[in-house]
Image (spheres, coloured by chain):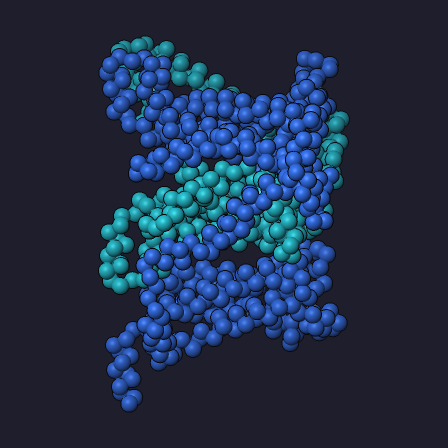
């Protein structure tokens, strides 16, 4: 696993002075820490700004010791700038999308993973190709379709397109996972007279829980963070998810950076929570798609 | 007779799979109806989800609903969860069934409130204009509660009998048809919302559609106009810059960081988290964060330059035509590095340590080890990273849209298309830009697909 650790061991064996070794390691830590802190600087700046007042920043400059810490920015972003409403909308869109895409993709993944039939590979490739599509190619027809169906400017339009668009990726991941389940388990159930749908629901799905969890975590952040579709398929401000809402907020409070940054931070809270508590699944999910 | 029934009871255990399955279906019906059918009046626009959101946050329709409407999606989600739980743990099926009934009652509280408690003009108006959605949900909720009859042992057994008899009556599904049954719904959705639109865009690019009237066929005119525009060259150039930056910087930096953090170093977890934390931020948030960093007078960078006395006249970053696109790309790279690092870390975990040992035994130094052992082993990951970088750079839209709206020479194809189609209502022209974008990306995607196909056929 560890290449550097191994080479270090090797150098210790060959007898390099331990003082130099320790110095090197300290230097490495210091450099790395400085680099990491610089990397995170934009985030610190955002956090710091959200607790200050614009007057303070204008008068004393950004690199000054803040006169006072205020939390009014958050309250104003939450109520007056309506981040509260935008966040609620995000959840109303994300949760049904997640349920829908996980259910439907597990259905198609089961069919693709476990049956030999005409067109299996073709359908699988259609799904894989769909994940790579630049979604700009879909914008106009989908816009037209939702208009025709009377779905324009509803949550439903967004939920449907999210389910459909992510179906490709979810099916791809689930199908490859389901192929790793040993066929003997399923055959045993089949011998016992279990129907296919029962095998899917009571054997395959519980076995696929790890990949479902990883997918759910990853897809939550993706759908929650979507911006383009919300811009295209919604018109009413009161329906906008938090990503599109932030753009509106920026337009309204052009120069009030403490308020904008406070809004941005509030908007990230849900995904940050998901990240903190489900980090393992998140990372798994990220690598799932490329694991093959 | 009575003893016969009793004896049968002893033999046949109660089974709540039917009840839980019904509960699941009802819950799905409630949720779908809540989102896709009119709760009031007749237009889908006035669906339950929107009324709920409005009443909770003081939106435009807040007077046309009551807060109790929250109980309906809540009941549906809880029912879904518990009926699934009941289905997967059959010995707890009865408990799950009772709970789902409880949630049915919870949902019905909304109707009870509306019809029996609430008074006055508003309530009367709501009652008079109730839409089909709320009626369907009412029926589904009543159905959910009606499962109570399955708790009666005799009825439960009778229901089992009936369902068994029904199953026997149903002609057996031909083995060949089964996969298509599984695929039917997802595939239909996929074809209608993804595949058909992709094809349809090609047609739209040959029309003069303005978003309102019927599209009229105009041949290749959109393309003729498009290829004469300097805007196209600008957008293509910016996409190319983005692409070059994305396949070089995050790849090398991500790989380097992955190699460093792959060792068991103290606190390595925190370093790793620091680098991939930007991944959870949405693009608009990243755009705002960096817009603030780049702010020409008060931003992080320029106030450092001015207050630090380094220069009196710092560059305007996003306000500078020559720099703006690079600033945006830098912000995008900031997020991408963590992603690439995660992918490489996963790839390094799969590297067989014995190969590295073998290299060490052969006397390879660190660089040789990396160049001749690790890098070739990571080749599959590198391909994925390359493909992802290309696709992401072609898709890039959000950052440009929020940071500059395509001004300051920062137009990219996606953004150019959006502005032409949705701000200038030249949808046919926008479709032509989308086709250009599609054609470029298909070159790379085709390569990846061909690779996957090859693997699949070998398998």
Looking at the picture, how far across and down is residue B262, in whole percent?
38, 26
Name the one closer to the observer, B41 or B20. Answer: B41
Q: Residue at x 61, y 62 (%)?
A: B37
Residue A172 location, quadrant: top left
Count of all numbered marks drawn on residues in the image? 0
Name the one closer to the observer, A1 or B32. Answer: B32
Q: Residue at x 52, y 73 (%)?
A: B142
Q: Is residue B40 left or right of residue A201?
A: right
Q: Is residue A184 left or right of residue B76?
A: left
Name the one closer to the observer, A143 or A122. Answer: A122
The colour applied to the residues of chain B in this rendering is blue
The colour applied to the residues of chain A in this rendering is cyan
Q: Is residue B37 left or right of residue A102?
A: right
Res. A104 in view: yes
Looking at the picture, how far across and down is residue B49, in whole percent?
61, 58
Q: Is residue A179 left or right of residue B129?
A: left
Looking at the picture, how far across and down is residue A203, in whole percent?
32, 55
* Quadrant where the C terminus of chain B is found in the figure: top left
Q: Residue at x 33, y 31 (%)?
A: B350
Up the image or down, A210 lies above or below B441; here it is below
Up the image or down, B154 lies above or below B187; here it is below
Looking at the picture, how far across and down is residue B22, in whole percent?
44, 68
Up the image or down, B102 lies above or below A23; here it is below
Name the one closer to the observer, A40 or B154. Answer: B154
* Quadrant where the N terminus of chain B is found in the figure: bottom left
Q: Residue furthest bottom?
A: B1
Residue B106 location, quadrant: bottom right
Up the image or down, B206 lies above or below B46; here it is above
Q: Residue at x 42, y 54 (%)?
A: B183
Res. A265 in view: no
């Amino acid at each position: 696993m560890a290449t550097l650790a191994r080479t270090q061991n090797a150098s210790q064996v060959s007898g390099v002075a331990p003082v130099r070794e320790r110095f090197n390691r300290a230097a490495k830590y210091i450099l790395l820490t400085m680099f990491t802190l610089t990397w995170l600087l934009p985030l610190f700046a955002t956090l710091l700004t959200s607790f200050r007042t614009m007057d303070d920043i204008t008068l004393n400059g950004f690199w000054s010791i803040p006169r006072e810490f205020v939390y009014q920015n958050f309250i104003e972003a939450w109520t007056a700038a309506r981040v509260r409403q935008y966040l609620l909308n995000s959840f109303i869109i994300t949760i049904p999308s997640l349920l829908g895409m996980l259910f439907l993709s597990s259905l198609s993944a089961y069919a693709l993973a476990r049956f030999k039939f005409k067109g299996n590979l073709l359908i699988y490739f259609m799904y894989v190709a769909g994940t790579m599509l630049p979604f700009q190619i879909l914008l106009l027809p989908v816009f037209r379709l939702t208009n025709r169906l009377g779905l324009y400017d509803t949550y439903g339009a967004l939920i449907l397109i999210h389910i459909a668009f992510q179906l490709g990726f979810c099916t791809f991941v689930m199908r490859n996972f389901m192929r790793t389940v040993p066929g003997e388990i399923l055959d045993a159930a089949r011998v016992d007279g279990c129907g296919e749908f029962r095998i899917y629901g009571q054997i395959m799905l519980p076995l696929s829980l790890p990949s479902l969890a990883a997918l759910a975590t990853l897809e939550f952040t993706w759908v929650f963070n979507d911006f383009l579709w919300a811009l295209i398929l919604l018109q009413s401000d009161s329906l906008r998810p938090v990503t599109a809402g932030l753009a509106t907020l920026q337009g309204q409070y052009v120069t009030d950076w403490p308020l904008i940054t406070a809004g941005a931070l509030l908007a990230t809270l849900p995904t940050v929570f998901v990240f903190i508590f489900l980090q393992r699944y998140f990372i798994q999910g990220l690598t799932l798609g490329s694991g093959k | 007779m009575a003893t016969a029934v009793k004896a049968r009871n002893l033999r046949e255990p109660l089974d709540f799979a039917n009840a839980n399955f019904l509960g699941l279906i009802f819950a799905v019906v409630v949720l779908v109806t809540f989102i896709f059918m009119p709760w009031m009046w007749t237009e889908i626009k006035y669906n339950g989800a929107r009324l709920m959101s409005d009443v909770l946050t003081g939106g435009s329709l807040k007077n046309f609903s009551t807060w109790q409407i929250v109980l309906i999606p809540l009941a549906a989600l809880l029912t879904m969860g518990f009926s699934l739980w009941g289905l997967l743990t059959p010995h707890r099926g009865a408990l799950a069934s009772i709970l789902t009934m409880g949630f049915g009652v919870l949902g019905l509280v909304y109707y009870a409130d509306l019809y029996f408690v609430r008074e006055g003009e508003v309530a009367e108006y709501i009652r008079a204009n109730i839409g089909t959605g709320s009626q369907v949900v009412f029926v589904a909720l009543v159905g959910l509660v009606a499962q109570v009859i399955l708790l009666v042992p005799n009825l439960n057994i009778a229901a089992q009998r009936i369902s068994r008899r029904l199953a026997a009556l149903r002609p057996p599904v031909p083995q060949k048809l089964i996969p298509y049954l599984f695929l039917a719904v997802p595939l239909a959705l996929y074809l209608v919302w993804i595949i058909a639109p992709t094809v349809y865009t090609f047609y739209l690019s040959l029309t003069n559609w303005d978003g309102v009237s019927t599209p009229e066929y105009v041949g290749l005119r959109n393309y003729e106009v498009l290829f004469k525009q300097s805007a196209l060259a600008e957008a293509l150039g910016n996409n190319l810059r983005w692409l070059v930056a994305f396949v070089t910087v995050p790849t090398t930096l991500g790989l380097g960081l992955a190699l460093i953090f792959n060792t068991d170093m103290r606190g390595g977890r925190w370093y790793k988290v620091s680098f991939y934390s930007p991944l959870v931020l949405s693009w608009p948030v990243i755009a705002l964060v960096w817009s603030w960093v780049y702010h020409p007078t008060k931003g992080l960078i320029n106030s450092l330059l001015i207050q630090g006395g380094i220069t009196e006249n710092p560059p305007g970053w996003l306000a500078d035509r020559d720099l703006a696109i690079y600033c945006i790309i830098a912000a995008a790279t900031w997020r991408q590095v963590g992603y690439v690092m995660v992918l490489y870390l996963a790839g390094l975990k799969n590297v067989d340590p014995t190969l590295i040992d073998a290299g060490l035994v052969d006397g390879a130094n660190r660089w040789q080890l990396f160049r001749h052992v690790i890098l070739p082993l990571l080749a599959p990951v590198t391909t994925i990273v390359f493909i992802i970088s290309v696709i992401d750079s072609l898709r890039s839209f959000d950052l440009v849209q929020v940071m500059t709206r395509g001004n300051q020479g920062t137009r990219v194809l996606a953004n150019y298309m959006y502005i032409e189609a949705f701000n200038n209502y030249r949808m046919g022209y926008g479709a032509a830009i989308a086709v250009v974008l599609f054609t470029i990306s298909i070159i790379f995607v085709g390569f990846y697909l061909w690779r996957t196909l090859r693997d699949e056929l070998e398998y």
